[in-house]
Image: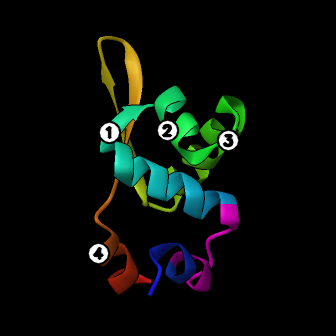
Amino acid sequence: MNLETTLKEYGLKERQAKVYLACLQVGSGPVLRIAERAGLARSSTELVLRSLQQKGLVSSFYKKSIKHFSAEDPHKIVASL
């Protein structure tokens, strides 16, 4: 089964699923890199990342004064939903 479809079935909106998957692909990185991977605007991606962070799906940290985001393990997330 497609992970994006599974995430949507568990209540994520389309943009949230795209940003989460882009974050997984990037590993950890700044908003701009995740936005490019997701195919969304930087400002939209930042808002979505904040909502995902509130849900516990991504975490953030600073590296050289730049905020980076990292996705949580999808298996842990699906198991907890």
Tag 2's secondary structure? helix
The crowd level at tag 2 (other Cα within 10 Å; few <14, some 14-19, many 20+) is: many
Along the line of sight, the residue nearer the viewer: 64 or 20? 20
Q: Nearer the viewer, mark 4 or mark 2?
A: 2
Q: Which mark is residue 76?
A: 4
Of the residues shown, which amino acid type is indicated by label 1? Ser
Q: Is residue 19 magenta?
A: no
Label 1 or label 3, whichever lies nearer to me, is 3
Q: Amino acid at mark 3?
A: Leu
As drawn, is 70 to the left or to the right of 48?
A: left
Q: Are marks 1 and 4 in contact (CB under 8 Å)?
A: no
Mark 4 → mark 2, Cα distance in angstroms: 21 Å
Quadrant (top left/top right/bottom left/bottom right) for the N terminus: bottom left
Q: Circle 2 is placed at which residue position?
A: 34
Q: Which residues are magenta?
A: 7-14
| Residue extending furthest toward the top | 64
Mark 1 → mark 3, Cα distance in angstroms: 17 Å
Query: Which colour assignment does the render follow?
Result: rainbow
Which type of secondary structure does the marked residue at label 4 adopt? helix
Q: Earlier in the sequence, mark 2 or mark 3?
A: 2
User: Residue 21 placed where, x, y %?
Assistant: 46, 58
Q: CA distance from mark 2 to mark 1?
A: 9 Å
The amino acid at mark 4 is Lys
| Comes first in the chain, label 4 or label 3 | 3
Query: Marks 4/3: CA distance?
Result: 26 Å
Q: Residue 42, percent across and down?
A: 65, 30
Q: Which residue is mark 1?
A: 28
Q: Quadrant of residue 56?
A: bottom left
Distance from Cα at disc 2 to Cα at disc 3: 9 Å
Q: Which mark is residue 40?
A: 3
